[in-house]
Image (cartoon, rainbow, N blue to C red):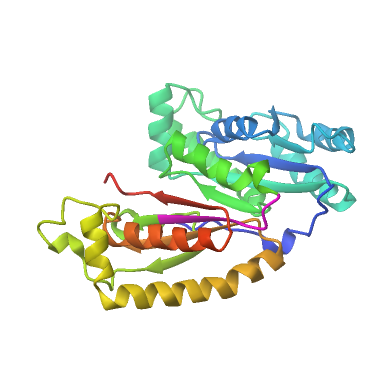
Amino acid sequence: MPKPKRRRGARRQRSPQEPRILIITGLSGSGKTHVARALEDIGWFCVDNLPSALIPRFAELIRGSEELRRSALVVDMREREFLKQFPHVFRQLRGRGGVAASVLFLEADEKVLVRRFSETRRPHPLAINQPAIEGIREEREALKPIRKMADLILDTSDYTVHQLRDYIREHYDVRHEAAPLVLSVTSFGYKYGVPSEADLVFDVRFLPNPNFVPSLKPLTGNHAPVIRYMRRQKDTAVFLDKLKSFLSYVVPRYIKEGKSYLTIGIGCTGGRHRSVMIANALGEALSGEGYPVRVRHRDLRQ
């Protein structure tokens, strides 16, 4: 699974007083509408299908507006001149200053996109009278230059609607802006792929596996017998101590860099025992350090 890409070089330090514009774009069927709805739920002002030529005018209008300090614009291939106009318009917007502008690019695997179009019975905008796969491939190729401009590229292939909503809330909730850094700890199983949103990934498959203990196999890392089994292993305590020490070193440096969120992935084979227990223990330790922490177990029901 591809890792999300962050264009750190294009990102500048922004003043807390600057209005913020998040441009949401990407492949049709990748979840742009769901992202916009999730942002609206946490206090963002969202506009869907705004013509690229009007983005600079919109930026001028929101300067000095307290109500519109967090705005999201969905722009994509529905606009006839999108490919031609957007790159120039966005570079112009960033060059002027006074507004913190960034691009969130959504994408997904071909098979996932085909399935989504089939389930919704909607035609692909570039393949009205053709199979959806033809439009998907044409759009992916056409959007390559805009994809390169993105601050964050998010592959939504493995996200349900609810998981995507939770991801957006975690990373863009304005209520978290007063906090220096929001931490997310995600347990997962390597057999299902590494979470695309993870910034740091730690492999705990070296720890003894409760799955091979008959009485523990049907349980998870949330259950007391599994936790006791893991705690009895010498390497568990050693690993947690070293991991907490490492994070106590790097997290303040991420804050100094201006990073507002950090996602930590903890992986084992199936994502049900070792990674769950370690993720819970790490989340508790980080909360004790005063950081806002969210723990999620991606593959618990696999």
Does the magenta-highlighted stretch encompass residue 66?
A: no
Task: Choose between 9 and 140: the one closer to the eye.
Answer: 9
Please say if 166 is above or below 219. Answer: above
Q: Quadrant of the N terminus?
A: bottom left
Rendered location of residue 56, percent (x, y): 85, 38
Left or right, 3 with reference to 10: left
Left or right, 49 with reference to 200: right
Please give the name of the residue rendered at 54% of the width and 34% of the height, measured from the top-left corner: 28
Task: Choose between 131 and 296: the one closer to the eye.
Answer: 296
Please give the name of the residue rendered at 36% of the width and 78% of the height, measured from the top-left corner: 238
Please say if 246 is above or below 160. Answer: below
Please give the name of the residue rendered at 38% of the width and 25% of the height, measured from the top-left corner: 119
Does the magenta-highlighted stretch encompass residue 185?
A: yes
Question: In which quarter of the view is residue 233 placed?
Answer: bottom left
Count of labels shown? 0
Left or right, 223 with reference to 252: left
Q: What is the span of residues highlighted in magenta in the rendered image?
A: 178-186
Question: In which quarter of the view is residue 126 placed?
Answer: top right
Rendered location of residue 160, percent (x, y): 42, 37
Tell me if I can see residue 131 in this picture. no
Left or right, 46 with reference to 267: right
Rendered location of residue 61, percent (x, y): 88, 32
Task: Choose between 254 and 216: the one closer to the eye.
Answer: 216
